[in-house]
Image (cartoon, rainbow, N blue to C red):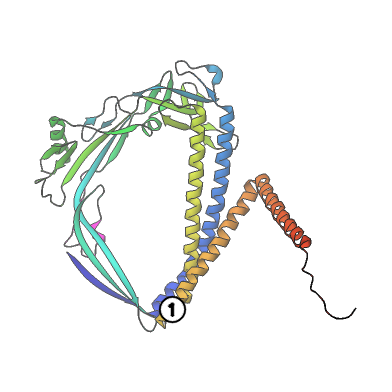
Amino acid sequence: MSFTETTRNSWFSRLKSGLVGLVIGPLLVFGMIWLLSWNEGRSVQTYRALSEGAGLVVSVASGTVDPANEGKLVHVSGSVTPQGTPEDPILGIAAQGAAGLSRRVDMYQWIEDSKSETKKTLGGGEETVTTYSYSKAWRSGRVDSSDFKQPGEHQNPDMPIEGERFLVENAALGAFTIDGKAVADIAKDKAMPLTADQVSRISAALGTGRSGRLEGTTVYVSGNRQSPSIGDLRVSFTREDISEASFVGAQKERRVTGYRASNGRELFLSAAGLVDAPTLFDAAQSENTLITWVIRAAGLLGMFIGFILMLSILGIIADVIPFIGSIVGFGTSVVAGVLTLILGPLVIAIAWIAYRPVLAVAIITAGALLAAGLIYLRRGKTSTAQPAQTPTFGRR
């Protein structure tokens, strides 16, 4: 089930878009400069806070709370016991002994997919042919069918209920108390089996008029499971269980919570199982490095897009002759890439000098000394090389 739509943009309308790009492009580039600078600062501050914490942390037994450690950065490991029971108040499902309970609700609904093909026309215009196709699929959130190109024939009803997560407020780790969300976040997810009574309760609570049928750990609220209709639902639950855990944080009375480092960064590390403090800090440093590189990549990509927007007007102007416009468009992409590769690393380098002056100066000095050494060796080889003597003929 599909239909095709053809749209045309004149050269003047495209020129207006290019002028908009001249405004948005520089803003995006400056935004990425800020992002890259901020990221280097965030990375350094996090690294320093973790390094500070690794030198201050005190490993304590979980069985008792020592008042002498009040306010200190402590590492504690042991058995975890959730306090309370996570429960879905709407569907009446509870997970005894779990730290968390997640409800997933999928609805069978219309999905719109589109594919576009754009061709340049003589005179600088563009012709875009877009094909819209419709299919039915299970989705966890309602797809807004009012945005479809053909909404009248493909309407999705409202979902009577959506997915949600329910957590215990606290958990006990020996004599210590840990925030329930912090414990649930490192717990292991496990599909929760349901009983016939619970299936009936879920069907009644949804109020769709359709009966529920249990298949595995999923309840299908549908008139015909093999041939679902638009608006049919399927509901499942996942419990979050954990038996042992390790945490690093500030000891405040009986609670282990975030610790404020000297640079203002908050430290709170966690892992499932019995994990020592050095391993927790090493994992946190690795995570910090990964986040740094991800943000760097995102910043460089955003900068490239900004330069593309700034230069796009040149390709639009040249599109009066499509062949010439394609060449110019390729050239502007190359220029945008070169500018990104120059400006991006330069911003990162300047941020390094600002946030890590000692290390930056050391690297620059080492590079300068290496370059000087190579030049010296090169000159030495040149001076020691003797030119071949040319024989002479004639009288002396």
What residue lies at 24% left-to-right and 62% top-to-bottom?
Answer: 148
What's the magenta region? 142-160
Most common SS among magenta residues: loop
Left or right relative to 381: residue 161:
left
User: Looking at the image, can residue 22 be seen?
Assistant: no
Can residue 159 be found in the magenta stretch? yes
Which residue is tagged 1? 325
Amino acid type of disc 1?
A: Gly
**Rendered location of residue 106, percent (x, y):** 22, 45
How many numbered circles does the render carry?
1
Foreground pick, 353 / 359: 359
Vertical placement of 325 versus 178: above or below?
A: below
What residue lies at 19% left-to-right and 36% top-to-bottom?
Answer: 217
Left or right relative to 56: residue 184:
left
Residue 86, located in which quarter of the rendered image? top left
User: Looking at the image, can residue 125 be seen?
Assistant: yes
**Rendered location of residue 43, percent (x, y):** 55, 44
**Rendered location of residue 338, percent (x, y):** 54, 65
Can residue 148 be found in the magenta stretch? yes
Left or right relative to 392: residue 113:
left
**Rendered location of residue 279, percent (x, y):** 49, 31
Vertical placement of 257 versus 14: above or below?
A: above
What residue lies at 17% left-to-right and 36% top-to-bottom?
Answer: 216
What residue lies at 52% left-to-right and 38% top-to-bottom?
Answer: 285
- Quarter of the image where the C terminus is located: bottom right
> Label 1: few (<14), some or many (≥20) within 10 Å?
some
Element class at badge 1: helix
Residue 318, located in which quarter of the rendered image? bottom left
Left or right relative to 34: residue 186:
left
- Quarter of the image where the N terminus is located: bottom left
